[in-house]
Amino acid sequence: MSPSKTPAEILDIDGAEVRVSNPDKVVFPEPGLTKLDLVRYYLAVAEGALRGAGGRPMVLKRFPKGIDAEPFFQKRVPENHPPFIDTATLHYSSGTSAEETVIRDAAGLAWVVNLGCLDLNPHPVRAEDLEHPDELRVDLDPMPGVDWSQIVDTAYVAQDVLTDVGLVGWPKTSGSRGLHILVRIAPNWSYREVRLAAETLAREVENRAPGLATARWWKEERGESVFVDFNQNAKDRTVASAYSVRSLPDARVSTPLNWADVRSARPDQFTVLTVPDRYADVGDPHAGIDHGVGSLDGLLALAAELGPAERAPRSGDGSGRRMSTMPLIEVARTKTKPEAFAALEEWKEQHPGLVSALHPADVLIDGMRGSSSLWYRVRVNLQHVPETERPPQEDLLADYDPWAGKTWPGRPGA
C-alpha cells in the first residue's frame, strides 16, 4: 500500500465526471498495479465488461484494505451515488430487500472500481425484469487434485449437452482455477425453473462423463472431479462476470474465450497487464452472446425424463438436517482464509499418522457467505483412513461465529 494518500484524480468519461480517490494506492503489489491502473483497465475493456454486467443489479464486493484482507459485500447502493448510476430493488428469499447498483456505461465501471470493487458480481437478471433470468450460468469448479485438462474435457462435454438441447454456450475462464459457460436464454422462466435446468445439465454431464465430472452438491462426495455447480443459478447468487479482475496476486482476469481456444488457454495467461492488448487485437469473443438467445424447453424436458435427483438422507432427530454419508470431522471455523489454513496445519500436527492417507479432495476448506463477508469452515473427510484409526469429532481449533451480535426476523432467539 502507498504510505500516504495522493490527491484525487477527476476523469471525464464520455461527459461524466468520475472522481478517483487515492489513485496511486497500490492494489496488487506483485505487478505494481494501482487503483488508477484498474480504472484504466476497465475503461480499455468497457464494452465487453458491460456486455456481461451492464444493466444488471450487482452486489458490490469491496476490497477497501487491498487483496490481502477479506472483502465485504454491499448489496445496497451507496446513498451518495452519482446520477449515471441506476438502481433496482431486489427482494430476497430471506424476506429482506435491497436497492442495488446498476451500471450502464464506462463511467459506472470506473465508479465501482473507485469504491474498491475488483470483480463485478451481477445477478442473472436485467433491471427491467427481476424475476426472470436471461442467463443460465455453468460453473465448472475443480476439486483439489484436478488439472486443467480435466476441466477442459468437462467443458466440451457440457458444450455437447447444450448443443443437444438447442442452446449455445459461451466459455470464459473464471479468473481462478475453473471455467464458466454462459448461456443466454429468453426471460420466460422463473429462478426455480432455471436452477432445475442447470441441475439437469449438470446431471447429464455427469451421466456422460462419470468420474470426470460430478453433479453432487455435497463437497465431500465429489472426489477428484469437476463439480458442475448448478446452484450458482439459485436466486440471490452472483458470479464474477466477463473481464472481472480477481483478487489473486497476479491480477488475473475472468476472460471470454472461443471454443477453439479453450484447450490451449491457461488461466494465468489473462491478467490486467495482458488482457487489454488481447482485447484490442482480437476483440471480445463474446461479442455475439446477445444474439444467441435460446429456450430451456429441451433441458426441462430432460429433467422430466431423468426424474428427481437423488437427495441426501435426513437425520432422525427431528431437526431435518442432512446426514452425510461420509466420515466427516469439522476442524475449525475461522474469520479469514489464512486462519483456516493455520488451523488445518495445527490439526495435521496433532494427527501426523493420518496425513499420508488423505487424498487432495479429502481436505475441505469452504468459503461460507456470512451477513456481509465470507468466513471459512475447515473439514476433513476420513474416507481413506482405516475405520479403526479415525479420530472422533474433537473441539474446534477455532470457532468463529459470523452471526454474533446480529439479529434478523426469524432467527432463532431473535
Image (cartoon, grey):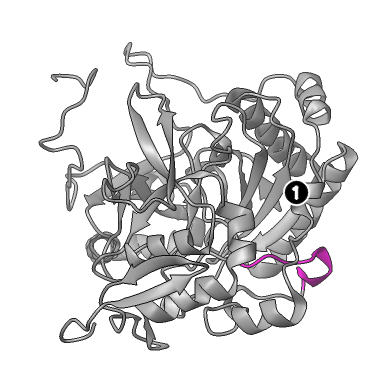
Q: Is residue 262 magenta?
A: yes
Can I make out residue 390 in this image?
no
Residue lying at 54% horizontally and 52% vertically, measured from the top left: 104
Query: Which residue is tagged 1?
Result: 290
Main SS of the magenta part reads loop
Residue in front for this viewpoint, 24 or 179: 24
Q: Which residues are magenta?
A: 255-263
Residue in front for this viewpoint, 140 or 361: 140
Q: Picture coordinates of residue 313 (x, y %)?
A: 49, 21
Horizontally, is 298 left or right of 359 in the view?
A: right
Residue in front for this viewpoint, 379 or 293: 293
For the view shown, which residue lies furthest in the left direction?
405
Q: Is residue 195 magenta?
A: no
Residue lying at 55% horizontally and 57% vertically, measured from the top left: 143
Q: Quadrant of the N terminus?
A: bottom left
Can I make out residue 86 in this image?
yes
Crowding at mark 1 (Cα within 10 Å: few <14, some 14-19, many 20+): some
Q: Is residue 188 above or below residue 99?
A: above
Q: Quadrant of the C terminus?
A: top left
SS for dot 1? helix
Q: Picture coordinates of residue 138 (x, y %)?
A: 65, 47
Amino acid type at mark 1: Asp
Q: Picture coordinates of residue 369 (x, y %)?
A: 34, 44
Q: Is residue 152 above or below residue 278?
A: above
Count every numbered label the image shows and give the total: 1
